[in-house]
């Protein structure tokens, strides 16, 4: 069924607001047992939501094609911020991912890098489309498409790996592979995908091997042991998340009634990485499925915007933002239910965190802008 531009606009806004409200409620709920004041986290999360709504509205009002023109500068800014955070930032929980803003908040450049990477790679493919269409041999393909593409992706991903943020690195790689599928119109697409996939897999193995804590996480995931060392050591958080989700049953234990969030989940993970586990414990299988359906519907609407866009750059941007939101939600939930190892990826618009919320709402404003110009 064909849908109108206004229909897409309203539905994207409504679904985004619903997910954001769930996020604010769950941050308040998950933070009740934390030692920072009853309303500390919900007030900050609400502030991030307001700032994100303002930046999203600003992006909605400007001509989005300006981002195509200045995509290189946006990428340079992202690279600069990533280098700054590697060189100058203080470590939090062993990772250097944040820039402190006047002791008020921490800004995470890797969240901005996702948006900058999508913008740059979208403009990159649009600019090279005629060159890609003219490719006749695989040597031409290597020189004009595959090697430059791998170099761009590897450089950004490498900087993020140095921050010890493997989760965001995985998101960047998934976005890159998806954009390659969209942008590579040559006859070597399947071969390019295969080469890219194995290149990133080898790089991922190397990134895991050089960091002992990543090896430990992988071994924890692979282990089926229920020994005290497993339950009290590296497997503790995984075990507590599984208890939370299993305790929820079909309908959940009830709002604010989670046991795991107050006594067992590590630190502030009840409102960040493991917030889905708290939701699953309190809202049960039904609540969890409803949230997943909301994410799927939002991604579907964004892809509809991409398909309908009359601009190649708009198509790439909307599709890239859609896969970003979908992949991030999928990986967070998959880690929480034990399908993949824990990666520290925030649940979009649900997990507590200013950088993620503001950048995501800004990106959704960009999608609305693309839809407006359809």
Image (spheres, rainbow, N blue to C red):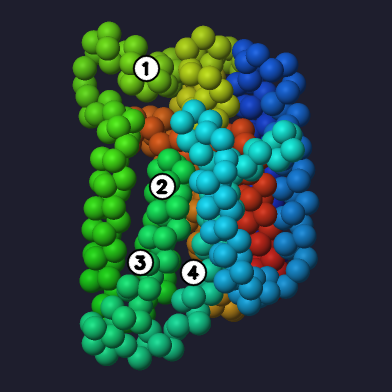
Residue under the point 52% across and 33% down: 91
- Asked if 71 appears above or below 178 in the picture, the reply is below
Q: Mark 3 points at which residue?
A: 150
- Quadrant for the C terminus in the image: bottom right
Residue under the point 75% across and 21% down: 39
- Which quadrant of the structure image shows residue 144? bottom left
Q: Are marks 2 and 1 in contact (CB under 8 Å)?
A: no
> Mark 2 or 1, which is nearer the eye?
2
Q: Earlier in the sequence, mark 3 or mark 1?
A: 3
- Secondary element at image label 3: helix
> Mark 3 or 1, which is nearer the eye?
3
Q: Which of marks 2 and 3 is nearer the N terminus?
A: 3
Q: Mark 4 points at which residue?
A: 121
Cα distance in 3D space between marks 2 and 3: 16 Å
Q: Name the residue under label 2.
A: 161
- Which quadrant of the structure image shows residue 65? bottom right
Q: Are marks 1 and 4 in contact (CB under 8 Å)?
A: no
The percent coordinates of residue 1 (x first, y second) are: 54, 65
The percent coordinates of residue 262 (x first, y second) are: 55, 12
Cα distance in 3D space between marks 3 and 1: 37 Å
Residue under the point 29% across and 52% down: 203
């Amino acid at each position: 069924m064909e849908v109108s531009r206004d229909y897409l606009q309203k539905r994207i806004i409504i679904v985004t607001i619903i997910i954001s409200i769930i996020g604010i409620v769950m941050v308040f709920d998950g933070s009740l047992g934390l030692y920072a004041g009853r309303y500390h986290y919900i007030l900050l999360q609400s502030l991030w939501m307001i700032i994100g709504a303002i930046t999203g509205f600003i992006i909605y009002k400007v001509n989005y094609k300006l981002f195509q023109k200045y995509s290189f500068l946006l990428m340079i800014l992202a690279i600069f911020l990533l280098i700054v955070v590697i060189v100058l930032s203080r470590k939090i929980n062993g990772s250097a991912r944040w820039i402190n803003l006047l002791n008020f908040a921490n800004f995470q450049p890797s969240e901005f890098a996702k948006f900058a990477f999508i913008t740059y790679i979208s403009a990159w493919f649009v600019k090279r489309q005629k060159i890609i269409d003219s490719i006749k041999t695989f040597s031409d393909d290597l020189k004009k498409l595959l090697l430059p593409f791998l170099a761009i992706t590897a450089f950004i991903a490498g900087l993020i790996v140095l921050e010890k943020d493997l989760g965001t690195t995985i998101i960047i790689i998934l976005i890159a592979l998806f954009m390659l599928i969209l942008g590579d119109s040559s006859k070597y697409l399947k071969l390019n995908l295969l080469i890219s996939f194995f290149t990133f897999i080898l790089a991922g193995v190397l990134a895991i091997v050089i960091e002992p804590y990543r090896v430990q996480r992988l071994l924890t995931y692979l282990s089926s042991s229920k020994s005290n060392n497993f339950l009290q050591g590296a497997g503790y958080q995984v075990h507590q998340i599984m208890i939370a989700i299993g305790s929820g049953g079909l309908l959940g234990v009830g709002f604010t009634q989670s046991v795991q969030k107050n006594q067992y989940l590590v630190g502030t993970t009840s409102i960040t990485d493991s917030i889905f586990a708290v939701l699953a414990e309190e809202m049960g299988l039904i609540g969890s499925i409803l949230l997943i359906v909301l994410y799927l519907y939002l991604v579907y609407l964004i892809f509809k915007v991409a398909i309908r866009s009359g601009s190649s750059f708009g198509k790439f941007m909307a599709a890239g933002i859609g896969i970003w939101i979908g992949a991030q939600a999928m990986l967070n939930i998959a880690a929480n239910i034990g399908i993949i190892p824990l990666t520290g990826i925030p649940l979009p618009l649900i997990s507590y965190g200013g950088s993620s919320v503001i950048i995501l709402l800004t990106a959704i404003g960009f999608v609305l802008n693309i839809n407006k110009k359809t």
